[in-house]
Amino acid sequence: MKLFFAMTLLATPAFAQDADGICPGAPDHAAEEAEIIAQLQKAADDLQARPLADQLWRLWTDAPDAKAQALLDEGVAKREGYDFLGARDTFDTLVEYCPDYAEGYNQRAFASFLRQ
């Protein structure tokens, strides 16, 4: 029974830890996202849609805590500087720290795609 409990803790992303603690859940922006998506569906053209899409990206890149945000920002900066391997490594760290934060995986995949 003790072995089962220990294995469960190791396999559960909610218990992902490092020296700085546990990554909290991502902020719940569901209501804001729904409102923006409703507005996007009514947008007449790209000129109206672009600011709404930017608002969605701001929500999606709102990391769970300061450490996760710093890792996300660092990885994006590396990617924008064409350091795709460095970006991927930083996003690996983000994913390890916050395994339930989808944007970490998205950014890591994008950096890998750009690297080909």
Image (tube, rainbow, N blue to C red):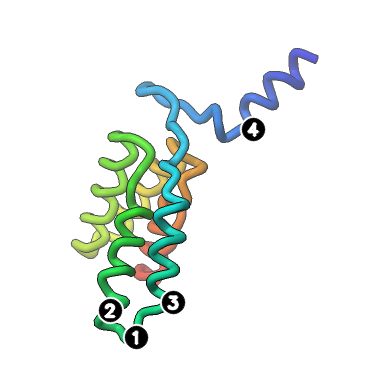
Between tags 4 and 2, which lies in front?
2
Residue at the spot of label 2: 48
Quadrant of the drawing holding the N terminus = top right
Place of residue 11 in the rendered image (x, y in percent of width and height, measured from the top left) = 64, 32
Residue type at the position of mark 2? Gln
Which residue reaches farthest left?
81
**Residue at the image position 75 percent from the left and 18 percent from the top:** 3
Pointer 1 with pointer 2, Cβ within 8 A: yes
**Residue at the image position 55 percent from the left and 31 percent from the top:** 14
Residue nearest the observer in this picture, 106 or 83: 106
Residue at the spot of label 1: 44
Secondary structure of the residue carrying tag 3 is helix
Residue type at the position of mark 4? Ala
Q: Does residue 56 appear to the left or right of 80 in the view shown?
A: right
Secondary structure of the residue carrying tag 4 is helix
Residue at the spot of label 3: 41
101 lies above or below 59? above
Which residue reaches farthest top?
2
Quadrant of the drawing holding the C terminus = bottom left
Place of residue 51 in the rendered image (x, y in percent of width and height, measured from the top left) = 26, 70
